[in-house]
Image (spheres, grey):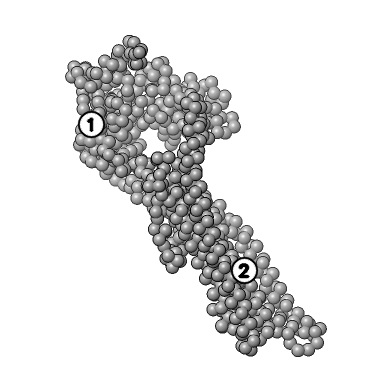
Amino acid sequence: MADVTAPYWRLETPTDRMGPWQVIRGMPAAIGPAVGLIRQAAPRAAWTVVTLHLAAGVATTYGLVATAGVLERLFAAGPTGARLVSAVPALALVVLAFAGRAGLEIVATLAQARIAPAVRRLADERLVAAGLSVELTAFDDQRFLDRMFRARDRGLLYLQRVVDNLVEAIGAVLAVTAAAVSLTVLHPVLLPVLLVTVLPDGWAALRAARLGYASNARLVALNRRVAMVTDLATEREPAAEVRATQAQGSVLSRYREAADLVCDEEVAVAAAQVRVRARGRLLAGVALGGVFAALWLLLDAGWIPLAVAGTALIATRTAVAALARLVRAGDQLFEQGLYVADFHAFLADATTRARPATGPPAPAAPQRIELRDVGFHYPGSRLVLRGVDLTLHAGQTVALVGENGSGKTTLAKIIAGLYRPTAGSVTWDGTDLADLHPDTVADRVMMVLQDPVRWPDSARVNVRMGRFDRADPDEQALRQAARAALADEVVDPLPQGWDTLLTTAFRGGVDLSGGQWQRLAVARGLFRDAPVLIWDEPTAPLDARSEYAVYEALRRLAAGRTVVLITHRLASVRNCDQICLLHEGEIVEQGSHHELLTLGGRYAELSLLQARMAEDPWLSLPHR
């Protein structure tokens, strides 16, 4: 699979080279963003959980210390019955302490259940807002797409898990602290003995988490490829062509090749993680044996009484169990925290790619749009446009024509302010477009594209999305736009008319043909009613009657507006005020239809070819 070889999909990350202490120092940075989200999404519930776990830790400490009093009375000299009776008050306090701890943990779990959904809701909204705020060129940048995929694929997935593991880790830390405090109270030398048991498992957990994260970072581009191929097999849109071209075998083969690479990497990483964890468990077992040996030596030397030794055993078992919880939670928390950090890195990147919402408002109806020496290239790509000079006046219709890939659509998006030129300038009534408030620029533009968005909503919403906040209480503007585009002929026969759901992804919805969707898109553009009109092959999928209706609507709209028309059908542009022929990113011919025919250049050649094809379509077929 040539396009997913190692240099393409393996991305080395700084995490590959991080040592254990670097990982530990990086832990706050990994989980800090998640903590910030928790504080914003559910601050009251978060503080409640922390407070309850802290109280549970105090109860644990008291219970362990009180256990020493129980054992001291049980091991004292005297009749068994008397010893049992004397131990009852201390035993009642122990039972009360641990029962209280259990109750506190149950209430903490209830409070915790409020946090994760609130965090996920806030994170989802921020991801959506970030995707909507970036400039259009971001979606042409491979690095941005990789970051966004990682944020969606793993960052959102692990956010809720981070919340659960963070609470688990807090509880485990407090439990270990309670045991440590208890051991310190019983005898100071017991504390360092306990700490030895955490080091091996802690090292193994950090190392395994680092291996998993680094592997996922290397695989991000390939995972995107797997998802894309899966969509070819499972989405409705490509289903017909896949079957018509008998491409099922090819799609399956490409999926297998990409998925096998992912599988091989994941198996190798899993094996490495198992080896690391095995070493950690082995060393942890040796360390625990050392703890029991140390207790025996302290008891044998008479440094601690038998009751304290017994309590120390209980405290040690409690601490070891809490340490196991902490290691598991810490392992997952560190790895998942890295993905959440990726999520926040994406948000930060998106912020830098968003155009600042500042500047004076754009002219309400620009009278003169000028492009001077405009050049443009996509991120990491060659120049798509170079040296473009063009002036557009209100009330004129300018046609952009040329072969596929000549830069027509890119130029139109620059005129509309969707792309900022990488060279030269664009001005509206003498003000550089880059200095104007981007929202007001967008407000002045209406675009109808050849591949419009098919909003998965009602027919009414599909048209109103042109300007959703437009006041139209009696829907006269909506219906007028629909009639002009002949979209009313599409909507009227639908089961629920304008309220019909236009997607088969949900029960009761319907789908439309390509031409019907295009009529709705044209109606959506007409409903927007803006002073700058950009029509990019708006009639490509339409029948002749619909195409005629659309051009009639465009002719009526053109008065007093700036109109840019992109088309391959040169017969449609003969009445345009100005025609610009683009070739390899440059305007090579410019003038009226008559002037360009008289020039006898590339435009005249293409016009003649299309005229001959209209007279005899068989001319377009190869002769035998």
Percent position of residue 356, x then y = 33, 47
Percent position of residue 604, x then y = 23, 18
Residue at (52% x, 62% y) in the render: 276
Instruction: Indicate the secondary structure of the residue bearing disc 2.
Output: helix
Percent position of residue 22, x then y = 42, 65
Residue at (37% x, 25% y) in the render: 538
Percent position of residue 307, x then y = 68, 83
Q: Nearer the viewer, residue 262 or 72?
A: 262
Mark 2–mark 1 distance (CA, rounded to whole Å): 72 Å
Tell me how many marks there are. 2
Residue at (33% x, 29% y) in the render: 534
Residue under circle 2?
321
Choose the circle earlier in sequence order: 2 or 1.
2
Q: Is residue 197 above or below residue 593?
A: below
Name the mark on residue 586. Answer: 1
Judge the density around disc 1: few (<14), some (14-19), many (≥20) Cα neighbours within 10 Å: many
Q: Nearer the viewer, residue 443 or 255?
A: 255
